[in-house]
Each structure stands twice: as C-alpha cells, then as structure tokens.
Image: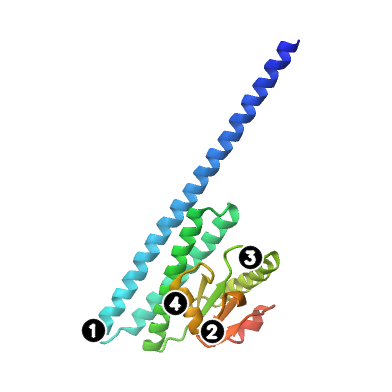
Amino acid sequence: MFSSQKNVFWQAFVLAAFVFAAGILLGFALENWRSGKIEKLYFQSELDLLDVEIQNEIYSLSRIDCSNAVRENIDFGDRIYEEAKLLDRYEQASKITDNMALQHKKYDLLRTLFWINSIKIKSRCNASYSIVVYLYKYNSPSLELKAKQAVFSRILSELKEARGGEIMLIPIAGDNDIISVKALMSLHNITISELPVILIGEKTKVKDIERKEDIDMLIK
C-alpha cells in the first residue's frame, strides 16, 4: 500500500513539474513573439520616418510640396498612434521584461523624432493639424498615478478617434532617461515630478483633466 502511495506521489510530482516547466517555456515563447512583432513594427516605422525626413531634406533643396509633406506626416502619425496602442496592449498582457522596456525606449526615440518633424512641417507649410504630446511616467508609477494616467490615456484616445488626422497625438515616456526627451521637456519647463503632462501646440501645458471637452476646447 505504501509503495502504491509513493508511486502516485512521484507521478503527481513529475506531472506538476512538467506542467510548470511547460508554462514557463510557453511564457518565454509568448514574450519573444510579442517582442519580435514589436521590433518588426518599429523597424518599419523607423524606415517610414526616415523616408519622410529624407523627403523634407529634398524639399529644402527646392520648393517644398506642402500638400504631400503634410499628408505623409498625417498618415505616419496615424500609423504610429495605432502601434502605440498595440505596444500598450502587449505590455498590459505581460510582465515588463528588460527586452520589452528596451523596445519601449526605442519607440520613445522614434516618437520624439516624429514630434520634431511634425513641428518642422507645421511651421514650413502652415499645416492645420494640432500637435498634442502626452508625456507620462513609465517606470514604477504609483497606483494613484496609474489611475490618473489611465484617465488621461482614455480621454486622449477618444479625442484622437473623434478628430483623426486633425491631431498628431504623440505619447512619450518622460522618465526613460532619454537625453533628447529630457532636453525637450526642459525646453518646455516640464519636470519628471509633474508627469503626466499634456503639451498642446508647444505652448499649453495641461496637468489635470476629467472630461474630453476639457482638453478638446484647448486644441485649435
């Protein structure tokens, strides 16, 4: 009888160990798949942005085709917004690993380049779109700050969905230790302790919102 109980115990132990190991392997495989998909999207966006920047350099040598430049920038802005939502879903669905955090940092750099490029095109072509930069805390936000940022994200997403290409919505982590982001934040007198902050049109800083209408009326 004791021998039979011992065999059952070891069989259960081996089965539990197998299920545990399979779960870990599946988790790693899923993380690698998500990371690979994000990296592929990032490289495509990087190429698209580089293409837009090269077009702008070509235009600087001659008369700029503003209609084309603005249209391409709006299209790119819409794509990068959709990718930002995808990245957020992946991060919500899994534990933030070093690899995922690195991918996020790369996207922050890409969005920062897009921010600068959008300012240039708007200035040179008198474009009608509004630039809305959402700077938020990414690394270990408190529960209270997470709740506040969730409200900000929801309201801005609703606004972007409603107004489409009229708004260049650019979400960027303000605490990812990126020199260029810190320089732009300093230029606009934004500190990490203030995050989250919404910057509208390079002039208006918003630190508290409750309704979409609160920010909608600030955007021209």
Q: Nearer the viewer, mark 2 or mark 4?
A: 2
Read off the residue under disc 4. 115
Q: Nearer the viewer, residue 185 or 84?
A: 185
Please indicate whether residue 218 sits to the left or right of residue 75 in the image: right
Query: What is the spatial separation of the Cα atoms under label 3 and label 4, in whole angstroms?
Result: 24 Å
Circle 1: element type? helix
Please indicate whether residue 216 sits to the left or right of residue 123 in the image: right
Circle 2: element type? loop
Q: Position of residue 130 (x, y in %)?
A: 50, 83
Q: Nearer the viewer, residue 26 or 156?
A: 26
Q: Residue at x 61, y 77 (%)?
A: 194
Q: Residues within 10 Å of mark 1 (few under 14, many from 20)?
A: few
Q: Residues within 10 Å of mark 4 (few under 14, many from 20)?
A: many
Q: Are marks 2 and 4 in contact (CB under 8 Å)?
A: no
Circle 3: element type? loop
Could you tell which of marks 2 and 4 lies nearer the N-terminus? 4
Could you tell which of marks 2 and 1 lies nearer the N-terminus? 1
Q: Residue at x 52, y 79 (%)?
A: 132
Could you tell which of marks 3 and 1 lies nearer the N-terminus? 1
Q: Quadrant of the C terminus?
A: bottom right
Q: Residues within 10 Å of mark 3 (few under 14, many from 20)?
A: few
Read off the residue under disc 2. 189
Could you tell which of marks 3 and 4 lies nearer the N-terminus? 4
Q: Label 1 sits on what residue type?
A: Leu
Read off the residue under disc 1. 61
Residue 141 numbered tag: 3
Please indicate whether residue 163 sits to the left or right of residue 49 in the image: right
Q: Label 4 sits on what residue type?
A: Trp
Q: Position of residue 37 (x, y in %)?
A: 45, 53
Q: Are marks 3 and 2 in contact (CB under 8 Å)?
A: no
Query: What is the spatial separation of the Cα atoms under label 3 and label 2, in whole angstroms?
Result: 21 Å
Residue 4 against residue 195 in the figure, above or below: above
